[in-house]
């Protein structure tokens, strides 16, 4: 059974970068398609990007193009999401989630990482 | 991009009520739709995938239906633990979009 454990909360200043990790257990990262979703306080879910198993490429939401980088360290089965040029609107809980069933659904999810951007 | 709308956005109901939430897509997405339940401070939990397939371990009072552009999530008899926010998500094409959510509250 896949389990995802994310890194702890972060506080960053505007203009800085943040790198959130998502450690996989139960499977190897190469067997999975990892995606990232964020949720601003009191708001809905927003897909940021993830690995497309059909094309073998990482796809980013246009909104985050140029600011987000999703990487994987297969030696430690850890996925990373780095977001740069942070602004206050990036304050949110960031989730990793596994795309399952080919292109079917997100399950499981990590527990979430709160990133606060404040001067 | 495919837009998803949900109705209602807020629902007040009592234990034992039958509840239906609708999700509409701006274009056809076949059956590439999932439903999630989220409680405050927790990650979303998968309920339904492929529009109508119940995720393992999810109570049978939850059901999903629809294809194309209109989908529904039904809770046949609302239980105290079902008070939460529900989101639909389309996985037909990138970007994978979520609906705005439906909050189910206690009447």
Image: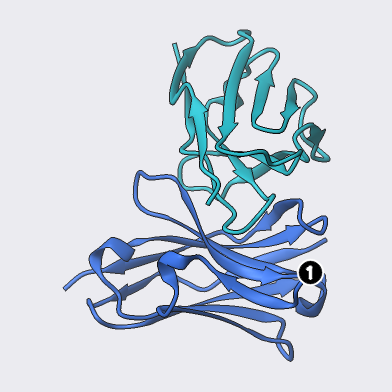
Chain colours: A blue, B cyan
Q: Which of B26 and A10 is in front in this view?
A: B26
Could you tell me residue B99's position as x and y percent?
Answer: 52, 39
> In the orientation shown, which residue stands out farthest toward the left?
A119
Check the image and report above or below for B89 versus A95. Answer: above
- Rendering coords of residue A119 (x, y %): 16, 73
The disc numbered 1 marks a residue on which chain? A
User: Toward the viewer: A105 or B94?
Assistant: B94
The answer to whether B49 appears left or right of A93 in the picture is right
Residue drawn at 64 percent across, 45 percent down: B90
At horizontal 41% and vertical 65% (from top left) the residue drawn is A63
Could you say which quadrant of the image residue B35 lies in?
top right
Give the labeled residue for mark 1. A54
Against A17, residue B8 (above or below) is: above
Picture quadrant where residue A93 is located: bottom left
SS label for mark 1 = loop
Q: Eyeballing the image, is B55 above or below B66?
A: below
Residue at point 64%, 27% (across, down): B70
> Relative to the observer, which residue lies in front, B65 or B24?
B24
Q: State the image quarter where residue B57 is shown.
A: top right
């Amino acid at each position: 059974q896949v389990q995802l454990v994310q890194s702890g909360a972060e506080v960053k200043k505007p203009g800085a970068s943040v790198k959130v990790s998502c450690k996989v257990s139960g499977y190897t990262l190469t067997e999975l398609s990892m995606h990232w979703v964020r949720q601003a306080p009191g708001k809905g879910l927003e897909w940021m990007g993830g690995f497309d198993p059909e094309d073998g490429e990482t796809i980013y939401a246009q909104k985050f193009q140029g600011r987000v980088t999703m990487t994987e360290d297969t030696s430690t089965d850890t996925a990373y999401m780095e977001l740069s040029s942070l602004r206050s609107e990036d304050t949110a809980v960031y989730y990793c989630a596994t795309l399952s069933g080919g292109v079917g659904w997100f399950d499981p999810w990590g527990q979430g990482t709160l990133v606060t951007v404040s001067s | 991009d495919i837009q998803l709308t949900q109705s209602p956005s807020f629902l007040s109901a009592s234990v034992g009520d039958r509840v239906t939430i609708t999700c509409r897509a701006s274009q056809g997405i076949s059956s590439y739709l999932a439903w999630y339940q989220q409680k405050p401070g927790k990650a979303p939990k998968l309920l339904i995938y492929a529009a109508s397939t119940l995720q393992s371990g999810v109570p049978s009072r939850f059901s999903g239906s629809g294809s194309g552009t209109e989908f529904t999530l039904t809770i046949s008899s609302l239980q105290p633990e079902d008070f939460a926010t529900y989101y639909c998500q389309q996985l037909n094409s990138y970007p994978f979009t979520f609906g705005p959510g439906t909050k189910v509250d206690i009447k």
